[in-house]
Image (tube, grey):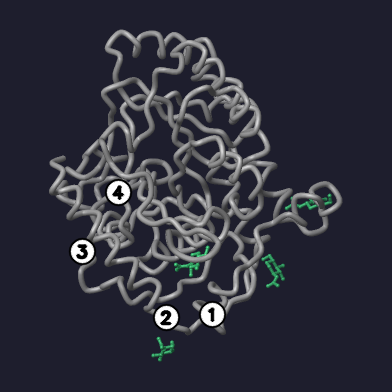
Amino acid sequence: MKLSTLLTVLITHLVTLQVVVQGINLNATKLTSQNDTVHLQAFQNVIPHYNGMLSNDLNNSNANIIGMERLKKTPFPPWLTEFTGITEWPGLNPPYIPLDFIDMAKIPNYATYQQGNCDANPREACSFDCDYCVEPDDVHTCYKLSQTFDDGPSPATERLLQHLRHRTTFFNLGINIVHYPDIYKKMIDKGHLVGTHTWSHEYLPSLSNEQIIAQIEWSVWAMNATGNHFPKWFRPPYGGIDNRVRSITRMFGLQAVLWDHDTFDWKLVANDPSQSEGQIYRNVMDWMKTGRGLILEHDGAERTVDVAINVYDIIGRDQLTVAECVGGADYIRKFDYNGEL
Ligand SMILES: *[C@@H]1O[C@H](CO)[C@@H](O)[C@H](O)[C@H]1NC(C)=O
Ligand SMILES: *[C@@H]1O[C@H](CO)[C@@H](O)[C@H](O)[C@H]1NC(C)=O
Ligand SMILES: *[C@@H]1O[C@H](CO)[C@@H](O)[C@H](O)[C@H]1NC(C)=O
Ligand SMILES: *[C@@H]1O[C@H](CO)[C@@H](O)[C@H](O)[C@H]1NC(C)=O
């Protein structure tokens, strides 16, 4: 990207966020009650590798096990109450809060579809997970072979942070950020780049426009409340992105990050015999022959973190963050505790 283009994009994003700050649209009173039990069940069915962590976290009767974590949850900030009328972090189904800078009329009218139902829309919808289709502003590779990590922060993330000796990229779930704020802050303190992986890992093409907006807005609010920044980089769960999803995430100033090398490490946690640690390491050594690419991994579980550490030992520290891969900015906005930086 030329520098002038980059600057235009940055300025557009700053203008967009200005509107976030000013565009207060309170209409949230009826939206506060959540039934976590019900959503949790649905969540576990689609993400086998999530069993345990989120269920413990969201289970009040289990508070003795995770009591300490709960006490340290990100405080719900006054600016967010003012903005939403809400006083607590949502459960797995975050409420939709209308935003002035989202123009619903500009969202293309493609059909919603479940993962794998790939004939719902014409090829022009540009689905990554169905057709490996990417748009010019998607990042899907890197000129240096580099690891990326989805689904954190989790208790397992800490071991990975202790081991890495380079700057990497973490795509975090908002719901995990507010439950593990100290681990999130450690990521940032160690200099890593953090992007959003939505609020609670839904397959976005199956959601309504409002539900997609809710998944993104709550995730960026979790990041601002915990790390005082707004992200520039967005990784869609399951690679689920098409031009309807893109049109929404672009209005948040986000740029999509996909991948060209998949470790399928989550299959280890799901006890799926079609993947093994040995196979992953052989694949990584193959990928090293070209020396380029973006690798998809996960820091949501101990076993995938074990793999991540070994993959790091194979590749070494000569890797880039996603922003470095394309010469982009790390964040679209940063604050210090006294206001804007
Ligand atoms: C709030 O919601 C009601 C009913 O859904 C709607 O009629 C009203 O226009 C909304 N107000 C704002 C400020 O969005
Ligand atoms: C949540 O859903 C469960 C299962 O459908 C139901 O038994 C329970 O009453 C619901 N709780 C609330 C507060 O709605
Ligand atoms: C919540 O915790 C209780 C007590 O530890 C356990 O029996 C129950 O299965 C848990 N529920 C969920 C959804 O994890
Ligand atoms: C982001 O956080 C800062 C303080 O850290 C706050 O001043 C600001 O209002 C927050 N929200 C938005 C939407 O900018």
Provide residue 313's location: percent of width, then percent of height: 52, 13
Pointer 2: residues within 10 angstroms few (<14), some, or many (20+)?
A: some
Disc 3 is placed on an element classified as: loop
Disc 4 is placed on an element classified as: strand
Q: Quadrant of the N terminus?
A: top left
Provide residue 53's location: percent of width, then percent of height: 68, 43
Q: Which mark is residue 24?
A: 2
Q: Is mark 3 within 8 Å of ligand 1?
A: no
Query: What is the CA distance from the residue labelled 1 to the residue labelled 2?
Result: 8 Å
Residue at which label 3 appears = 108
Pointer 1: residues within 10 angstroms few (<14), some, or many (20+)?
A: few
Disc 3 marks which amino acid? Pro
Q: Is 139 placed left or right of 86 in the picture?
A: left
Question: Which residue is found at the position 16% from the left and 46% from the top?
Answer: 123
Query: What is the CA distance from the residue labelled 2 to the residue labelled 3?
Result: 25 Å
Circles 1 and 2, Cβ within 8 Å, touching? The answer is yes
Residue closer to the observer: 34 or 140: 140
Residue 130 vertical position relative to residue 276 in the rendered view, above or below:
below
Residue closer to the observer: 321 or 94: 321
Residue at which label 1 appears = 82
Query: What is the CA distance from the residue labelled 4 to the residue labelled 2?
Result: 24 Å
Residue at which label 4 appears = 255
Tell me which label, 4 or 3, sits earlier in the chain: 3
Image quadrant, ligand 2: bottom right
Q: Is 15 placed left or right of 158 in the picture?
A: left
Picture quadrant where residue 86 is located: bottom right
Disc 1 is placed on an element classified as: helix
Disc 1 marks which amino acid? Glu
Picture quadrant where residue 18 is located: bottom left
